[in-house]
Image (cartoon, rainbow, N blue to C red):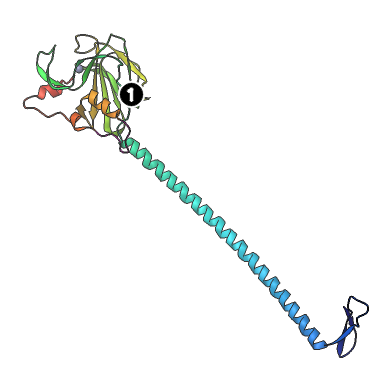
Amino acid sequence: MVIGGGTPAWTVIVVPPTPSAAPKRLGVKMRTIRMLVMYVATAAACLVIWETGRSEAAALAAERLSEARIEILALRDTMQTLRTASMAERIRNSPPVDMIMPVSGAAVSSRFSHSRFHPILQIFRAHEGVDLSAPAGTPIVAPAAGTVKSVGRRFGYGLTIELVHTGGIATRYAHLRSANVKPGQQVEAGALIGAVGSSGLATAPHLHFEVLVKGTPVDPIKFVAATRQPATSTPPTVPASVAAPVQTQGTPVAHQLPF
Ligand SMILES: [Zn+2]
């Protein structure tokens, strides 16, 4: 294509690809050329403005996306913190699971009872724990994780250890020969806490083991067995069979000396 000069119009000579065909002449007015140029310039300007706007909008969108991402992360972090706190609270309020007996393989020489004849005191009174017969020096282990509440000598009980566990559960170990823990100490399930003895009112070496649910003694054997049931969606609760002993008439002595 050839554009020839001239006023007031341009002459465009269109030369065909085959030399035998005659070239064509087209007259193009200056006004038409100017308008064409103006249209092209306007379109280019519009394109530039649109592209600029689009990149600005994209930058803004990216910034908002980044802000939203930060908010989501913060929200997720808060939810995680709340979930952890809620889980910790649930563990604190749930009784221990999979408890073990503090002396393994020991024979039960006296069961939990609301009224039994005491061999030394020669009176009927409650036995608020279970007696596990074992040779002096037999290791006593914590049946569940907990904190040592007290270690000391008590009338009748002799050398005694008290542990507190989650869910308002406490355990007591009496007639010990020795203690391996100190008050305030954290113990894991199965940790050595002391040794079987016959301190206090005891006719032979044995461990007097008590389990208290919110301060009320329950049958330790039934309670420990209940914590070992197959896992369910709900934490174990104290079964009715090991619930608080019924207060019988005229037995105040029994509750003062429950070892
Ligand atoms: Zn006892």
- The residue beneath circle 1 is 183
Residue at 31% of width from left, 11% of height from top? 138
Q: Quadrant of residue 122?
A: top left
Q: Is residue 233 magenta?
A: yes
x then y, percent, for residue 76:
47, 48
Q: Position of residue 91 (x, y in %)?
A: 34, 36
**Is 10 displayed left or right of 108 in the figure?**
right
Name the foreground residue: 21 vs 25: 21
Find residue 7 and report its horizontal and vertical position in percent: 88, 90
Whether 191 is drawn above or below 33: the answer is: above
Q: Position of residue 240 (x, y in %)?
A: 19, 32
Q: 248 or 239: nearer the eye?
A: 239
Q: Residue furthest left?
A: 250
Q: For residue 119, what is the image quadrant?
A: top left
**In terms of secondary structure, where does tag 1 sit?**
loop
Q: Main secondary structure of the magenta part?
A: loop
Q: Which region of the structure is painted magenta? A: 230-237
Q: Is residue 72 visible?
A: yes
Give the quadrant of the C terminus: top left
